[in-house]
Amino acid sequence: MKSGTRRDFLKFVGLGAAGLAMSRPLAASGANRKKPNIIFILADDLGWSELGCYGNTFNETPNLDKLAKEGVRFTDAYAAAPVCSPYRAALMTGQYPARVRITDYLRPNDKNHLSTNYTTIAEMLKSAGYATGIIGKWHLTGYANHGAEEFPPSKHGFDETIVSENRGIGGGSYFYPYHFNHEIKKRLPGKEHLIDRMNLEAVDFVERHKDEPFFLYLSHYAVHTTLSGRPDLVEKYRKKPGAGKSPKGRGAAALEDQRAKSNNPHLAAQLEAIDSGVGMISRKLAALALTGNTLVVFTGDNGGESRVTSNAPLRAGKSTLYEGGIRVPLLVRYPGVVPAGTVCRTPTGNIDFYPTFCEAAGIKPDPRQRLDGVSMMPMLRKSAAKVQRDALYWHYPLPKPHFLGGRSSGAIRQGDWKLLEFFDTGESELYNLADDIGERRNLAKGMPGKVAELKKALADWRNDAGAVIPPGYAGYDPESGSRHP
Ligand SMILES: [Ca+2]
């Protein structure tokens, strides 16, 4: 949507400036009581295999496992990209990263950013009377501290921005004072750890907004490298049988230590802290009698980093379009709507949260903002529900390989079939995930018909989405099927 149409859009949904101003008192008086609260908890770089309820036997995630028991666990949930910013662009807009034109992570001085021309999910919910807040990582803008014009959460519909970055965030910053924001004041006694602080802020946010519908986006910086857990928790996992050495994702010693690539005590410590926060939030909701009217989502933004963990049985990790880079954990609890203890095997993407949250809140999305996702509400009500979708698509053009190994590529998943197309060499790989979740048997050579069919579907989708492969990002032109000179 163009910026000029935003006012018209607010009129369209019956909420001009006056309507926005009035929506809060209405909500507080109970007129909106039926609208569910929405808590979206995102862990950074958390692979599909890390939670107990996904089969991990080293990490301890009792509160997340309980969430799965009380709701639905998705086996085939996908991130729209194998790195941070494009996932977040898709989450906010309901569109594929290729359509939003954010297909790689944004650098601290990046001119590219999430355009205010979009109506974000936060703006949608805000216009329906929700209090909106983000705690933690945004990563959809460059930073004024690095010379870029800034487009922070406050320009995208968030009333409150709490413990969030205003500087480059690479390299981790898990203990106060936080290098990604020098202005944050300490609140916890002793050596304040970021995850604990964010959990505290989340519980406070719920308490503050208990009398109105709220949307809380709790966006953890963990478990991104450089990993650094709370010392007492790291010590606990170091002593646990099967513990790998505890590298911090940097330096030759860390890279040479093969055992560090699984059962990583720092990662386990960070994950336990995230899990404790989920427990704190659940207890707060229960104490306020809000559990029944709150939709809680827990997920990850891309696969685990292969330098510090293993995504096995999935292949590879962050920065690649193999399953290890894009398949993520997804748990949803919504009592009375989601039957407890269910498992959903239908593929979903994080482009689906936008229409899902709109439907849950009873809001019609703006027809002028194209949505690539479909509402998950039918799947939430009944895990075997049919979904109107042909395929999921990925577009990840790179000028050179990512430092973690990812290559310039695209991918499509249609049913159990998965095709990866590499823009650097023109090669394709074909897998059937039903009996090869680890993408070990490339079937491309023996099935040229299937390869051609999926390549065409992927090319058609690229056309529709306006997906661009910039000059110099490929040695091969997938549209013409020929090599660049
Ligand atoms: Ca990430």
Image (spheres, helix red, strand yellow):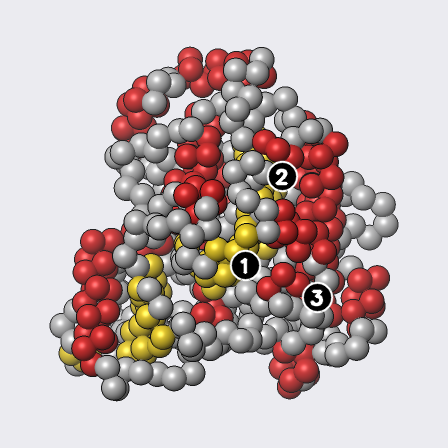
Residue 340 position within the rendered picture, expressed as x and y whole percent measured from the top left: 59, 46
Q: Which amino acid does label 2 sit on?
A: Ile
Image quadrant in which the C terminus is located: bottom left
Q: What residue type is labelled 3?
A: Asn
Residue under label 3:
59
Q: Quadrant location of residue 449?
A: bottom left
| Element type at mark 2 | strand
Residue at 22%, 75% (x, y): give it: 450
Q: What residue type is labelled 1?
A: Pro
Disc 3 under 8 Å from ligand 1? The reply is no
Residue 258 position within the rendered picture, expressed as x and y whole percent measured from the top left: 65, 84
Residue at 71%, 29% (x, y): give it: 288
Residue under label 1:
329
Towards the viewer: 287 or 185: 287
Image quadrant in which the N terminus is located: top left
First along the sequence among labels 2 and 1: 2
| Element type at mark 1 | strand
First along the sequence among labels 3 and 1: 3
